[in-house]
Amino acid sequence: MTAAQAKRAATGAMVGLALGDALGFPTEFNDVPSILAKCGPWREMELPKKAFVSDDTQMTLALGRGLRTALARGPLGPRRMERPVREEFVDWYHSPENNRAPGRTCMVACRLLDSDLPWQKASQVGSKGCGANMRVAPVGLVPGLSERERAGAAQLQSALTHGHPTGLAASDLTARAVYLLAQGVEPAGLVGQLRSYALESRERYESLWLGDLWTYSQDPTPSHFMARGWDECLAVLEGLEAALRDRSARAALEETDPCLVTGDGWVAEEALGTALLCFLMFPEEPLLALRRAACTKGDSDSIACLAGAFAGAHLGVGAWPGEWVERVEYRGELVGLGEGWDGVERTGS
């Protein structure tokens, strides 16, 4: 049994992302003073009694189902993955439950995916919104993938809707962070490992997975296309590392707003950076990480969703209070997917 299986990291991450989403959904579009006036001190924020989630969790589940279908047919590859994930995204687009203020890029791309167009023509190559990396955690949780398979799958699921190179790179990094934490990498070394990975990947274009996507941009070469995205992610990681080193700045951020350092999270690299910051300020206190992420002036549900995935991958399902888990929307499906990837044998009906 691996360390990830022992702590049930996949179940912890899937539940954690939904809890963060449900905690941050009511505070999205509010500044910190407004959130404090509505919810009280951020360290005491409580999960709503009806813990509804946003499109972040809905699309994470769609990706998870698509991956499960693809893997049931054999080893993961771009052609085997693209069709079931595309179908799940289109089903989400048409679902009556798609009423949680979904992002414009996802809606436009999914409308185009609901056609015979090659997916590259549906992809919004000008958008680096956070709608791709907030849903990518399952790619980091699926067991048995090689590093290149994980990178390719993370970038492909992004590219189906958000084809901007920063969206691709941020999704790759998010899946990488979830994977490393699930495997037992210590949080203190996480940012350094992500920076090294980004530098190694900077000019690599996953042509097997992305096809001719880069030609829909104005970049002269595929390596130039990818370098733009990785450079924006590296800039955020460098700012994050500096904030974590400066103890006084870090203490101030705990009581003000992490968005002041790493951005409001509406775009992919900022959502990754701010979620990592919230998690790394409280790596062994998962509820504080979620609460800090939810009490931010930016895209609070996506930031808290990612922070919950990181905390759950690190600490496992035991990180979350049972009474919170019982209340979160889609609990059964979240736990079912997580337990499947954790190798948990289920008994009964």
Image (tube, grey):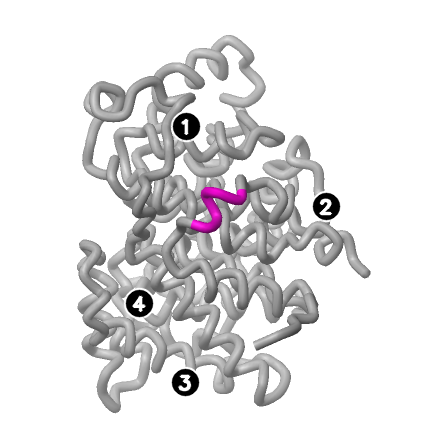
- The reply, left or right, for residue 305 in relation to residue 150 is left
At x 28%, y 71%, the residue is: 123
**Mark sitting earlier along the chain (1/3):** 3
Is 323 included in the stretch rendered in magenta?
Answer: yes
Residue of label 4: 161
Q: Quadrant of the N terminus?
A: bottom right
Per the rendered image, the range of residues in magenta is 322-326
Describe the element under mark 4 as helix, strand or loop: loop
Question: Which mark is in front, 1 or 3?
Answer: 1
Mark 1: which secondary structure?
helix
Q: Which residue is labeled 3 in the image?
A: 83
Of badges 2 and 1, nearer the viewer stands 1
Quadrant of the image containing the C terminus: bottom right
Between the C-alphas of marks 2 and 4, the distance is: 31 Å
The residue to which callout 1 is attached is 292
Earlier-in-chain disc, 2 versus 1: 2
Q: Residues within 10 Å of mark 2 (few under 14, many from 20)?
A: some
Q: Of label 4 and label 3, which has the lower sequence position?
A: 3
Task: Answer above or below: position of 285 versus 131.
Answer: above
How far apart, in angstroms, are the residues tagged by discs 3 and 2?
Answer: 32 Å
Front-most of residues 150 and 213:
150
Callout 1 environment at 10 Å: few (<14), some (14 to 19), or many (20+)? many
Q: Position of residue 33 (x, y in %)?
A: 22, 19
Q: For numbered disc 2, what is the local secondary structure?
A: loop
Among the 4 quarters of the image, the one containing residue 336: bottom right
